[in-house]
Image (spheres, rainbow, N blue to C red):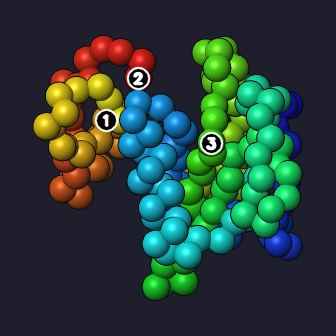
């Protein structure tokens, strides 16, 4: 396994969360910018850092002014109900497709271990600059039916190509 979990501030689990929002830098950083805004607006707490050997070797200074190796950050946003929504994002992603897949599998295994039932990936796609739509492209037909029954804007015809 190439994924090291660095638990932060005394945390040792994923707070019993059931939903996780995930995004990495990509097309216009749309998804990452959305997660960064959610984290900032809702005073998200950092639960863990995920260090993976596939991330580019670019250390940065963290919010405490300490040198931090490349990582993805898992943060928790407290809801009024007392439950949490998780977010996962970082400043980079693996550059090679096979490493992207390997890291994704290890993150999915971690989320499954902590019984996260929904993973929602936020991403942008190249399109006309004036197009400002948000929609969902699910990965299973049963989840698509569930989302449609809840009134979500689910697409069956796009994106039709590109790096999905």
Counting other residues with Cα less than 10 Å from the Cα at mark 2, is it few (<14), some (14-19), or many (20 or more)? few
The quarter of the rendered structure image containing the C terminus is top left
| Front residue of this view, candidates 33 and 21 | 33
Q: Report the residue marked by disc 1.
A: 137
* Distance CA(mark 1)–CA(mark 2): 10 Å
| Vertical side of 88 occupied by 137: above or below | above
Q: Position of residue 99 (x, y in %)?
A: 69, 20
Give the mark nearest the N terminus, 1 or 2: 1
Task: Tell me the tag on residue 164.
Answer: 2
Q: Determine whether label 1 and label 3 are within 8 Å by CB.
A: no
* Secondary element at tag 1: loop
CA–CA distance in space, label 1 to label 3: 24 Å
Question: 142 or 134: nearer the eye?
Answer: 134
State the image coordinates of residue 19 (x, y, percent, origin top left).
Answer: 51, 58
Tell me whether the residue at label 1 lies in contact with that at label 2, contact meaning CB atoms closer than 8 angstroms.
yes
**Residue 123 seen:** no
Q: Is residue 50 left or right of residue 136?
A: right
98 vs 5: above or below: above
């Amino acid at each position: 396994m190439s994924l090291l979990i660095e638990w932060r501030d005394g945390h040792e689990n994923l707070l019993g969360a059931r939903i996780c929002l995930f995004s990495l830098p990509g097309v216009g950083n749309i998804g990452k910018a959305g997660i960064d805004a959610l984290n900032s607006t809702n005073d998200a707490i950092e639960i863990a850092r995920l260090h993976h050997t596939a991330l580019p070797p670019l250390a940065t200074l963290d919010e405490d002014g300490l040198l931090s190796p490349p990582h993805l950050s898992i943060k928790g946003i407290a809801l009024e109900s007392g439950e949490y929504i998780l977010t996962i994002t970082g400043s980079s992603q693996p550059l090679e497709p096979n490493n992207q897949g390997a890291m994704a599998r290890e993150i999915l295994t971690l989320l499954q271990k902590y019984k996260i039932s929904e993973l929602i990936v936020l991403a942008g796609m190249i399109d006309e600059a004036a197009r400002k739509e948000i929609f969902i492209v699910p990965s299973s037909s049963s989840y698509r039916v569930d989302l449609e029954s809840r009134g979500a804007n689910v697409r069956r015809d796009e994106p039709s190509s590109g790096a999905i």
